[in-house]
Amino acid sequence: MFSLPQPPQDATIRVIAPPESFSVKRLTMRKSTLDEGYKMGLKEGMLHIHRRKALNGSHDENC
């Protein structure tokens, strides 16, 4: 997983990751599995943005 070496003190890092039950490996090349993971990530990313907007009136630039 990527991490910032020294994030700013006031930074909030939110990790969007697939569930543990999603069995994909680093070298997976099966297109159907990669497509499934991509769709999961897209859905979770959109849900995150929607939740942030609902919680504090965020917009796309400060989610």
Image: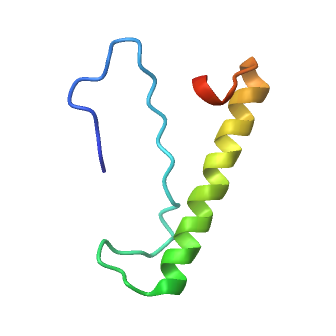
Question: Can residue 28 be seen from the camera position used here?
Answer: yes
Counting from the top left corner in percent of width and height, residue 3 is at 29, 39
User: At x 29% / y 46%, what residue is drawn?
Assistant: 2
Number of disc labels: 0
Q: Outermost residue toward the left?
A: 5
Q: Quadrant of the C terminus?
A: top right
Residue at the far top in the pictured view: 10
Of residues 19 and 53, the one nearer the viewer is 53
x and y, in percent, of residue 41 in the image: 56, 58
Name above or below for residue 17 compared with residue 61: below
Percent coordinates x, y for residue 52 in the rendering: 68, 29
Side (left or right) of 61 relative to 56: left
Q: Residue at x 47, y 42 (%)?
A: 15
Q: Answer yes or no: is residue 63 visible.
A: no
Residue with the most extreme front position: 61
On the image, which quarter does residue 55 sit in? top right
Please tell me which residue is depicted at 29% across the width and 77% down the height of the picture: 27
Quarter of the rendering containing residue 39: bottom right
Residue drawn 69% across the image and 25% down it: 59
Is 15 displayed left or right of 46 in the figure? left
Above or below, 17 relative to 57 = below
**For residue 26, above or below residue 29:** above
The structure's colour scheme is rainbow
